Each structure stands twice: as C-alpha cells, then as structure tokens.
C-alpha cells in the first residue's frame, strides 16, 4: 500500500511555488541519473498556477519530455484540450525548450488511436516517469479513471501491460485516453495536487474504506507503490 505524505498550504501561491520546486528537483535528479527526464501532468484549471511557476525553473528543459496523464479526445484547437492548456501555461519561457508528446493522435476515436499512441510513447518518453502530477475530481476520479468508466477495470488492473487505455464514462464528457494505473504508480515521484475545501472533503471520503470503483482515486491512495505518494492541498 502506498505511503502517503500530506502537506497543507495556506494559499494556492505557496502550493504552486513548493510544487514547482519539488517537481524541479525530481526532473533534475532524472537528468543527472539518466541524461533525460519525463514529466506527466494533468489538465483542468487547478494546475495553471503551478505550470506558470514550473516554467520559470532553471532546468535543462532540452532534456525533459512532457506529456499528459490523460486527454480528452479532441484536437488542440478545442478549448477543452489538455494539450492546449499545457502549451499555453507550461511550455513557454525556459520550459519552451522541452519536448511535448501529446496523447491525441488525430484518429477518429481513442480506441483507434491506442496502438499508434503506444508506439509514440515508447519511442519518445522514458519510463518509469520521473514525475507525475495527478488531480482529482469531486466524483473521486483521477486521470481518466471515472466511476462507471467502460474500461475502468482494464485501466486499474495492477497486472496489466498496456501503457494507455481509452475511456468512456457519463461523467467524462468526451471520450478520453489515459495512462494506466501501473504506469502512474511506477513513477519515481508521484503527487496528488488538490485545492479547495470540497476536494478536501472528497479526499477524506476516499481515504475511508469503500469500493475502488465508486471512487477510483482510491486505487492511487491505496495502491501497491514502493515510493511515497505526496498529497498537496490549499484552500
């Protein structure tokens, strides 16, 4: 079971600065050890300030590959594209030198794009990932592990061999593609970034006993992981 380290901050600004430092250290360690580093981030509104702070960090960004934890199956021109958010908020300034590997392939469906994406990731991203920054929804989802997801059992299979899996769920909006649980848990540095009192209440419930299928974030919080999972929160 994962060892959980939790840190609360008084403001979102303090959290963003600390998380940027933490992520910077993880990426620099990866570069020092392997000559390159990989970072997978989440979309949504929560990480925007963190992205801005991280983009200013003095990292050898030319040796960093950035990708997404999950993605809506939409083109980057769509306002709901996570890739669009990352390019606008993170991959500028110093971080503009990083290599970005999107998850959307342009295929009509995520199911059709899965094989090509597996090949793209294998060729472009170093595994295990050096740093993964997860978010969490008020329904208890993380990545695209949604309650009621059509491929949730596949995505959460601790013995699964897939890197990514397509996901469709009522709460997801668009069809999605997501890294699988084993890939996320294997990361050298794993952080759950949440903000707001409502998310704090969801986290408290998720830490209670209950079916993983009802609150898939439990698969991360209680998953088989040998390294600590860091939880950061601000009001």
Image (cartoon, helix red, strand yellow):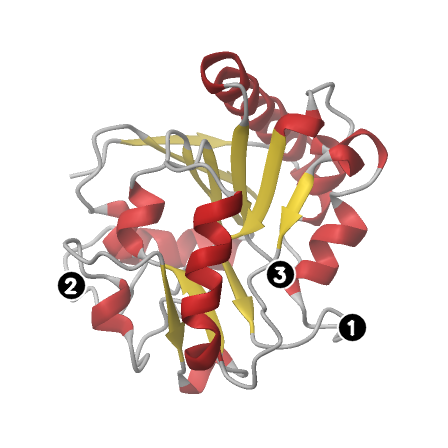
- Tag 3: Cα neighbours inside 10 Å, few (<14), some, or many (≥20)? some
Q: CA distance from mark 2 to mark 3?
A: 26 Å
From the viewer's side, name the closer residue of 202 and 53: 53
From the viewer's side, name the closer residue of 203 and 76: 76
Instruction: Give the vertical position of 215 relative to 200 (above or below).
Output: below
- Asked whether, in this view, residue 42 is left or right of residue 146, the answer is right
Q: Position of residue 155 (x, y in %)?
A: 28, 65
Residue at (37, 72) in percent of width and height: 146
Q: Callout 1: helix, strand or loop?
A: loop
From the viewer's side, name the closer residue of 167 and 113: 113
Residue at (77, 34) in percent of width and height: 97
Are the residues flagged by discs 1 and 2 in contact, CB closer than 8 Å? no
Which residue is label 1 attached to?
Answer: 77
Q: Earlier in the sequence, mark 1 or mark 2?
A: 1
Please, which residue is most extreme toward the right here?
93
Q: Tell us which disc is closer to us: 2 or 3.
A: 3
Residue 61 found in image quarter: top right
Q: Earlier in the sequence, mark 2 or mark 3?
A: 3
Q: Position of residue 4 (x, y in %)?
A: 29, 33
Residue at (32, 75) in percent of width and height: 147
Q: Callout 2: helix, strand or loop?
A: loop
From the viewer's side, name the closer residue of 226 and 16: 226
Which residue is label 3 attached to?
Answer: 44
Residue 23 found in image quarter: top right
Q: Quadrant of the C terminus?
A: top right
Which residue is label 2 attached to?
Answer: 210
Confirm whether residue 69 shows in the render: no
Q: CA distance from mark 1 to mark 3?
A: 16 Å
Q: CA distance from mark 1 to mark 2?
A: 39 Å
Q: Position of residue 204 (x, y in %)?
A: 32, 52
Q: Callout 3: helix, strand or loop?
A: loop
- Asked whether, in this view, residue 99 is left or right of residue 38, the answer is right
């Amino acid at each position: 079971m994962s060892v959980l380290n939790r840190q609360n901050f008084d403001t979102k600004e303090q959290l963003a600065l600390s998380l940027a430092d933490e992520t910077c250290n993880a990426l620099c360690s990866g570069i020092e050890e392997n000559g390159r580093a990989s970072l997978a981030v989440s979309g949504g509104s929560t990480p925007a300030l963190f992205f801005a702070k991280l983009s200013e960090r003095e990292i050898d960004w030319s040796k960093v590959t950035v990708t997404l934890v999950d993605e809506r199956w939409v083109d980057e021109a769509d306002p709901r594209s996570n890739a669009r958010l990352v390019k606008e908020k993170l991959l500028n300034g110093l971080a503009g030198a990083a290599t970005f590997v999107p998850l959307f392939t342009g295929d009509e469906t995520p199911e059709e794009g899965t094989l090509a994406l597996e090949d793209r990731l294998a060729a472009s991203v170093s595994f295990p990932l050096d740093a993964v920054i997860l978010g969490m929804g008020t329904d208890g989802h993380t990545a695209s592990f949604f309650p009621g997801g059509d491929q949730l059992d596949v995505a959460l299979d601790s013995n699964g061999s897939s890197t990514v899996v397509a996901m469709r769920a009522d709460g997801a909006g668009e069809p999605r593609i997501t890294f699988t649980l084993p890939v996320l848990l294997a990361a050298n540095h794993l952080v759950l970034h949440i903000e707001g009192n409502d998310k704090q209440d969801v986290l408290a419930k998720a830490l209670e006993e209950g079916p993983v299928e009802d609150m898939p974030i439990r698969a991360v919080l209680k998953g088989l992981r040998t390294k600590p999972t860091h939880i950061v929160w601000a009001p």
